[in-house]
Amino acid sequence: MASTTTGPLSFDLKGTDGRARRGRVTVPHGVIQTPAFMPVGTRATVKGLMPRDLKATGSEICLANTYHMDISPGPKIVKKMGGLHEFMGWDKPILTDSGGYQVFSLPKTQLDEEGVTFRFEKKGGKKVKLTPERSMQIQQDLGADIAMAFDVCVPYPCDYKNAQDAVYRTIRWLERCKEAHTRPDQALFGIVQGSSYADLRGLSAQLTMGIDLPGYAIGGLSVGEGHSIMMAMIDCTEPSMVKEKPRYLMGVGYPEDIVEAVARGVDMFDCVIPTRYARSGVAFARHGRFRVSNARYKTDKYPLDTNCSCYTCKNFTRAYLNHLINTNEILGSALMTLHNVTFYQDLMRTIRTAIEEKNFEKFRVSFLQEYLAEDK
Ligand SMILES: CN(C)CCSCc1cc(N)cc2c(=O)[nH]c(N)nc12
């Protein structure tokens, strides 16, 4: 087993099966078994789950977001309250995104070499600038175990020149992030860009690997390009990424995306899908996802997934969840979220075991066959 320590983060590559990797990430607040799924807790809460429930799902790390936490309550208050872990009552690892991605999705943002300027409604439409240095300051105040570099994630599709400019600006901003990032107990991850251009993906990966960091993310995907381009871009990027450090595919994704990305060498994932879909009444199960709020489930006495051992599946029927979601009851969101995140974590656990037992390819084929079967 190869073990690499870079600052506050260690990565142990415990085994491989083809390009799939079984590993372990160790940071100040604990250990993350990989491949890992990280539930999204944008405003220092995974919507609908108390920390004790989030633990019950098997989650070992969760996300929070720089842009949202800067708006409220502000990094200085979080720092004064002891940092994110104390503030939100989560004593396991946390990762924060850098805020660039969220800001780019706002209307009327202006991008220049210094950073991104956007209009901040809460402060009476005041103009606010997010820069690599400001993003690092906020993330260091928040105190997550892993901080993400401030990058330029272009929309899809994007013309070649803009994608190329974004690759070079992201590298220049990464140098500034590394310069500004001084907190010794927080790992900084670089982010590879390159949109849907194979040569830019390879270029961005090589330039990013040239900056020594504890881990690296594949960014700029899951932005509407679709599954096949996403996989093709991973194939253009992964071979240029160092093997001894963790790879994090940002914003991914559906179970079918995750399984195929693990097969291509990805270690870490985050996505709002299981939590966001739960609140809209969509449940994930072995045979695919389904909308439990549909009339056909009104008298269905079965659990969401008969293979699932979560509190929701052990105690409640689809009929009851149908009722809760259709009457917009808070408990509906909580129970659906608990199940969906447990489903994702059970999938990750099955993936890790399959890699350990050297039968990941057999698992990949059988999982996708059942999960994507047409005749649901
Ligand atoms: C809390 N989450 C929703 C945010 C974490 S992931 C956000 C996110 C998603 C995607 N798809 C691409 C990128 C990207 O290229 N760069 C950054 N910084 N973040 C990204």
Image (cartoon, grey):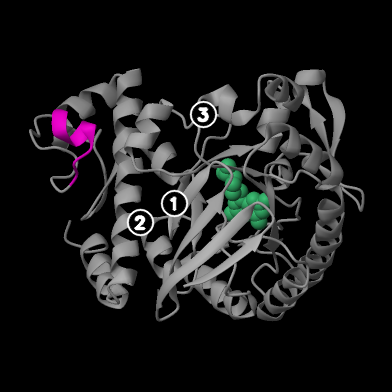
Q: Which residue lies at the image location 72% right of the left edge and 20% below the top edge? A: 80
Closer-to-camera residue (176/368): 176
Tell me which numbered mark, 3 or 2, is placed earlier along the sequence. 3
Residue 311 visible: yes
Task: Tell me where residue 254 appears, x and y as whole percent.
Answer: 40, 55
Could you give the CA–CA distance between mark 1 and mark 3, rounded to whole angstroms?
16 Å
Circle 1 SS class = strand
Q: Does the beta carbon at disc 3 come under 8 Å from ligand 1?
A: no
Residue range highlighted in magenta? 308-316
Closer-to-camera residue (141/235): 141
Q: Is residue 134 left or right of residue 91?
A: right
Quarter of the figure that contains the C terminus: bottom left
Amino acid under disc 2: Met
Residue 131 visible: no
Amino acid under disc 1: Phe
Task: Tell me where residue 284 appears, x and y as whole percent.
Answer: 29, 47
Tell me which numbered mark, 1 or 3, is placed earlier along the sequence. 1
Q: Quadrant of residue 309?
A: top left
The circle drawn on residue 45 is: 3
Residue under label 1 = 37
Q: Is residue 179 magenta?
A: no
Q: Which residue lies at the image location 58% right of the left edge and 25% below the top edge? A: 86
Crowdedness near tag 1: few (<14), some (14–19) or many (≥20) residues, C-alpha within 10 Å? many
Q: Quadrant of residue 151?
A: bottom right
Closer-to-camera residue (186/194): 186
Q: Which residue lies at the image location 78% right of the left edge and 41% below the top edge? A: 135
The circle drawn on residue 348 is: 2
Look at the numbered discs 1 and 3 and tell me whether their residues touch, using CB distance below 8 Å: no
Look at the numbered discs 1 and 2 and tell me whether their residues touch, using CB distance below 8 Å: yes
Q: Relative to 349, is 297 above or below? A: above
Q: Is residue 194 left or right of residue 334?
A: right
Q: Is residue 311 magenta?
A: yes
